[in-house]
Image (spheres, rainbow, N blue to C red):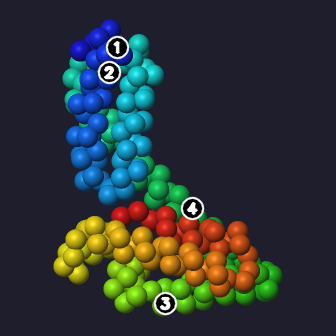
Amino acid sequence: MDRSNINIHNFKEFYDAYFDPLCKYLNFYTKDVQTIEDIVQEVFLRLWENKDIIEVSHFKAYVFKSARNKILNYHRDEVNRYKILEKWFESQLVEKDDEAEKFQIEELIQTLLDAIATLPPQCRDIFLLSKSDNLTYKQIAEKKHISIKTVENQMGIAFKKIRDYMFANAKYNYPILLLLLELINGRGN
């Protein structure tokens, strides 16, 4: 197809034909359904917005390559975001001249450790394998002989319980608390 062939009718046909296959394809890169659907929507939106200037000779190859590039860019950006937050948080902990504020950060970290300790045993183990050992959800599932869906569910439970515990028990520095929670939850697997 060339650029003159993209119109509202065949675009809808392409969208209906390729939305689900693209989502299944991106599932190899992430298990986050919302991220997958957002990326597929972005691919089609970009195609529609640029229908008059993009020349596509093989539609299927074009949308799959676009989706793959977008998910890889998404992962790169997530890693960079995590590194920036981690670097900032470490600088806050190490470089603080104000001993009271330094104590508050250390107290937040202790509260986080306490929150992790309150998790149910399997949930805590899965969380630590992900965050301390940096294992992917797939690696954790294989190691624990459970499904990836179980790992995802247990991580979701862990994030919720940790967030709830932190907000109920942390006494100081809410902006740093929010960044700490973002660090914990921000690493995708």
Q: Which mark is residue 11?
A: 2
* Residue type for callout 4: Ile
Q: Position of residue 69 (x, y in %)?
A: 34, 41
Q: Position of residue 6 (x, y in %)?
A: 32, 15
User: Which mark sits nearer the N-terminus, 4 or 2?
Assistant: 2
Q: Which mark is residue 118?
A: 3
Foreground mark, 4 or 3, reads: 3
Distance of mark 2 from mark 1, alpha carbons? 6 Å
User: Depth check: 96 or 149 in front?
Assistant: 149
Is 173 placed above or below 40 here? below
- Mark 4 or mark 3: which comes first in sequence? 4
Q: Disc 1 residue type? A: Asn
- Quarter-of-image position of residue 18: top left
| Amino acid carrying mark 2 in the image | Phe
Q: Quadrant of residue 91?
A: bottom right
Which amino acid lies under the numbered mark 3 shown in the image of this protein?
A: Thr
Q: Earlier in the sequence, mark 1 or mark 4?
A: 1
Residue at horizontal 37%, vertical 30%? 44
Would you say 158 lies left or right of 140 here? right
| Picture quarter with the C terminus | bottom left
Tell me where residue 179 appears, x and y as whole percent: 62, 68
Distance from Cα at disc 4 to Cα at disc 2 = 39 Å
Whether residue 149 is visible to the viewer of this picture, yes or no, is yes
Local packing at callout 2 (Cα closer than 10 Å; few below 14, some 14-19, many 20+) is some
| Residue pointed to by mark 1 | 7
Q: Mark 3 vs mark 2: which is more N-terminal?
A: 2
The reply to whether the C-beta atoms of the residues labelled 1 and 4 are less than 8 Å apart is no
Mark-to-mark CA distance, 1 and 3: 56 Å
Tell me whether circle 2 and circle 1 mark residues in contact (CB < 8 Å): yes
Query: Residue 58's spot in the image, x, y percent?
Result: 21, 23
**Residue ID for mark 4:** 84
